[in-house]
């Protein structure tokens, strides 16, 4: 299999969740076990040299790849969730989305000072979500050794928000 087949399994849905947005729907990729496994393994190959002690991922589609990567890399998993979804003491950050604003949280004891963290999400768009999540993890003392995405929407220039981090994407699209 190849990156081209993985890319072909991601469909565009126009005007979702609001007019003017072209949503990248990864559900066809997830339904194909072989393609999904290949995507996770290719992402793991990008992360292995970073020797993370944990993988942090952003709700909700980031969880799909983050948990699978944590298993592949044999390290812990840290969920970064939408506000009000975590049951223990949290740290929060608000940020701008491509189509609005949101707040995310992480448990205050999720990352220990000096832990090597790879942050994972499915799509890099404007970079706001990843920047906010990385800021929370750093505030807890984590060392962000990489920020990893399945797909990068390069026309939105999200990397500019993440210049201080090592950013990698399995796929990139200019539209």
Image (cartoon, grey):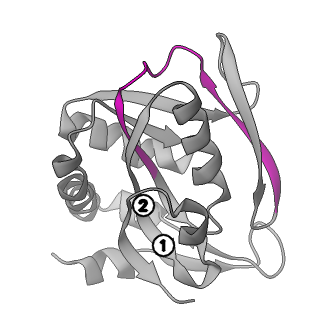
| Secondary structure mainly formed by the magenta segment | strand
Q: Position of residue 40 (x, y in %)?
A: 26, 54
Q: Quadrant of residue 108?
A: top right
Question: Viewed as shown, does residue 86 lie left or right of 98?
Answer: left
Vertical position of residue 136 compared to residue 65: above or below: above
Crowding around mark 1 (Cα neighbors within 10 Å: few <14, some 14 to 19, many 20+) is many
Q: Position of residue 171 (x, y in %)?
A: 37, 75
Question: Viewed as shown, does residue 31 lie left or right of 159?
Answer: left
Q: Quadrant of the N terminus?
A: bottom left
Name the residue carrying label 2. 149
Q: Is residue 111 magenta?
A: yes
Q: Are marks 2 and 1 in contact (CB under 8 Å)?
A: yes
Please give the count of numbered marks on the rendered protein: 2
Q: Quadrant of the C terminus?
A: bottom right
Name the residue rendered at 31%, 74% in the picture.
6
Vertical position of residue 91 compared to residue 122: above or below: above
Disc ID at residue 152: 1
Magenta region, residue range:
100-120
Q: Quadrant of residue 69?
A: top left
Cα distance between the residues tagged 2 and 1: 7 Å
Name the residue rendered at 49%, 57% in the picture.
164
């Amino acid at each position: 299999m190849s990156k081209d087949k993985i890319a072909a399994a991601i469909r565009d849905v126009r005007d979702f969740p609001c007019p003017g947005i072209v949503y990248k729907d990864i559900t066809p990729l997830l339904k194909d076990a072989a393609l999904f496994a290949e995507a996770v393994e290719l992402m793991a190959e990008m992360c292995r040299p970073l020797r993370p002690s944990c993988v942090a991922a952003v709700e909700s589609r980031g969880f799909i790849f983050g948990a699978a990567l944590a298993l592949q890399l044999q390290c812990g998993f840290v969920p970064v969730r939408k506000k009000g979804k975590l049951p223990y003491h949290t740290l929060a950050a608000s940020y701008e989305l491509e189509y609005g604003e949101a707040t995310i949280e992480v448990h205050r004891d999720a990352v220990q000072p000096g832990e090597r963290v790879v942050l994972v999400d499915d799509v890099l768009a404007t970079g706001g979500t990843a920047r906010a999540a990385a800021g929370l993890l750093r505030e807890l003392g984590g060392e962000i050794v990489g920020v990893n995405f399945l797909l990068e929407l390069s026309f939105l220039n999200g990397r500019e928000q993440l210049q201080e981090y090592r950013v990698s994407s399995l796929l990139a699209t200019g539209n």
